[in-house]
Amino acid sequence: MTKTEKPWGYEEIIFNTEIDSGKGYIPIALKKFAVDSEQMTSYHIHKKINEILYVNKGMIEVRLENDVISLNEGQSYFIETKIPHQIQNITSKVVEVIEVSFPFDLKDEERIEDPYSEQR
C-alpha cells in the first residue's frame, strides 16, 4: 500500500491491478483517502479515468461542473471521465472515502483550481 500525505489529508492506494474486460486488460485501483475537517481536494479533471466514490465515514460534498451533491456515510457516486470534480469535507471530523479508479493512470489528473497551490 502506498500512502501519500496531502495538504487536505492523505491518499492511500490499497491495490492497483488489471482486470480482464473480455476485450483486453483494464488497469484499476482501489484507494482510500481521508479529508481533514472542513478541507477539500483540488478541483480537477481526468481525461481517461472514471471514478466511483463511496463515503466510508462522515459526509462530503462533491462539486461538479454545474452542481454540488451531498453524500452521507454509506452512499456512493459515479464520476464519469472528463467531469471536473472536487471533494469537500463539510463536517468537523475527518471523513474517509473509498475510491475505485479505472482505467487507472497516476498521471491522468489536471488541476483546475487548487486551494493548496502555495503548499505544493
Image (spheres, helix red, strand yellow):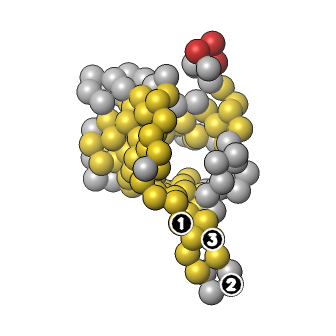
Quadrant occupied by the C terminus:
top right
Circles 2, 3 touching at the beta carbon (< 8 Å) = no
User: In the image, which disc is placed on residue 23?
Assistant: 2
Q: Residue furthest front?
A: 1
| Label 2 Cα crowd, 10 Å radius (few <14 / some 14-19 / many 20+) | few
Can you give x and y, in whole percent of width and height, for residue 37 in the image?
Answer: 34, 23
The answer to whether any part of residue 93 appears in the image is: yes
Q: Where, by quadrant of the figure, is residue 117 drawn? A: top right
Q: Which residue is mark 3?
A: 26
Residue type at tag 3:
Ile
- N-terminal label among 1 and 3: 1
Mark in front: 1 vs 3: 1
Per the model, the C-alpha gap separating discs 1 and 2 is 16 Å
Q: Amino acid at mark 2?
A: Lys
Crowd tier of the residue under label 3, counting other residues whose Cα lies within 10 Å: few below 14, some 14–19, many 20 or above: some
- Circle 1 residue: 17
